Image: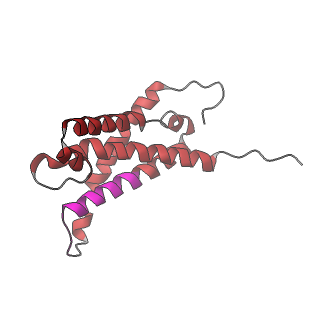
Amino acid sequence: MVEPGREPNFFFFLIQQALVPVLAFLALVVTAQVPAAFNFGMHNQVVDNWWAMFVVVSFTLALGFLAAHLTPNFADDGRFIWAIPTTLLVMGIGFDFRHGFSREIRDAFFPIGENEVGLLFSFVTLPTYACIAYSLGVACARRILVPKPQPRA
């Protein structure tokens, strides 16, 4: 919740809009070999995709919660960073539906194959998940951390 008398800062919004997907990508790079290390006989591209979604969502959810706890004003400006990437993803899916690109729609969420198949998932879908999870983390933290007014007796 923005403090009374404080104007939202668009610059802080832009910083978070850029940093959250980059930090999520770095977390994914650092943990990329974890599924291979715990090979239970089912290590394949589907496991890698689920691992990527798990890492991105859990990391950015925690990051949003931490940002709201440590820097409440900064985090308040990033509450709505989900809007731009989500709008772009929905517009892309609508375009693919309209033009009959059903394979691209599948590849946006569950890419399986070689070469450039995972690019849409990596550069559109995962950053969208990261921004949504960060915004949820900020929103949940604000609900938990903001003191509720006590009724007067």
Magenta segment's dominant SS is helix
Q: Give the percent coordinates (x, y) of residue 141.
A: 56, 48
| Residue 6 falls left or right of residue 132 | right
Quadrant of the rendered structure where residue 42 is?
A: bottom left
Confirm whether residue 20 shows in the render.
yes
Task: Check the image and name the residue furthest to the bottom.
Answer: 40
Confirm whether residue 18 shows in the render.
no
Quadrant of the rendered structure where residue 149 is?
A: top right
| Colour theme | secondary structure
Magenta region: 41-59
Q: Give the percent coordinates (x, y) of residue 127.
A: 32, 43
Residue 42 within the magenta-colored segment of the rendering:
yes
Task: Check the image and name the residue furthest to the right.
Answer: 153
Task: Work out whether residue 7 or residue 69 is closer to the camera in this orientation and state it.
Answer: 7
| Residue 70 falls left or right of residue 85 | right
Task: Check the image and name the residue furthest to the left.
Answer: 115
Task: Work out whether residue 35 or residue 91 is closer to the camera in this orientation and state it.
Answer: 91
Q: Give the percent coordinates (x, y) of residue 87.
A: 36, 34
User: Which quadrant holds the N terminus?
Assistant: top right
Q: Residue at the spot x=45%, y=48% of the render?
A: 63
Q: Residue at the spot x=10%, y=49% of the render?
A: 115
Q: Give the percent coordinates (x, y) of residue 76.
A: 53, 36
In the rendered view, would you say 50 is above or below 138? below
Task: Work out whether residue 100 or residue 125 is closer to the camera in this orientation and state it.
Answer: 100
Q: How many marks?
A: 0
Q: Residue at the spot x=41%, y=55% of the render?
A: 58
Q: Residue at the spot x=29%, y=45% of the render?
A: 125
Residue 30 within the magenta-colored segment of the rendering:
no
